[in-house]
Image (cartoon, rainbow, N blue to C red):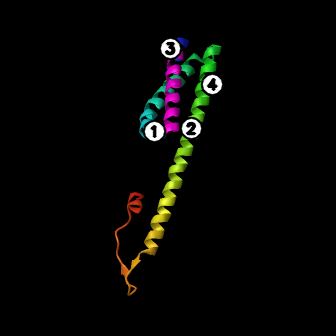
Amino acid sequence: MSNREIGKLSSALIALLEQESKALRKRNYELIASLAHHKEKLAEAVELAVSRIAGGGDDALVEMLSMINEKAKRNAEQLAAVKQGFLDARRRIEAIAEAEAKSGLYSAGGQRIAAARSAVASRSV
């Protein structure tokens, strides 16, 4: 594969990483998920192509690969933060559901009244 073809693949990957970054900033989770498979395939193609030239790349290609690496790292950090946010939110919801289960409703005579679980607790499962 020529450096030009690798450059085209790399440019496509850079554009996709930029699209993913915008989706992360907008919290567009559907778009993030839809880009994941395409990003993985493009990254594999670039990696394979670069490995085949074994050191014969020019400075522009090296710079482009460095840019891809930086964008990918930045997106990975943002994805990790999003994941942590989801995990934190789930823990908070589970804590609310647990507290709700312990509190409950009681009659004037002190008998526990069965009540439906709240929508928040039901969605956390």
Describe residue 70's horizontal placement relative to residue 20 as left or right.
right
Residue at the disc numbered 3 = 5
Give the foreground label among 3 and 4.
Answer: 4
Mark 4 and mark 1 lie on one chain; the one further toward the N terminus is 1
Give me the disc on residue 14: none
Label 2 to label 4, Cα distance in Å? 15 Å
* Numbered disc 2: secondary structure: helix
Whether residue 54 appears in magenta in the rendering, the answer is no
Label 3 to label 1, Cα distance in Å? 31 Å
Residue at the disc numbered 4 = 66
Mark 2 and mark 4 lie on one chain; the one further toward the N terminus is 4
The magenta region covers: 7-26
Give the foreground label among 3 and 1.
Answer: 1
From this viewpoint, is residue 59 visible? Answer: yes
Whether residue 22 appears in magenta in the rendering, the answer is yes
The majority secondary structure of the magenta stretch comes to helix
Q: x, y (%) of residue 47? A: 54, 25
Residue at the disc numbered 2 = 76
* Numbered disc 1: secondary structure: loop
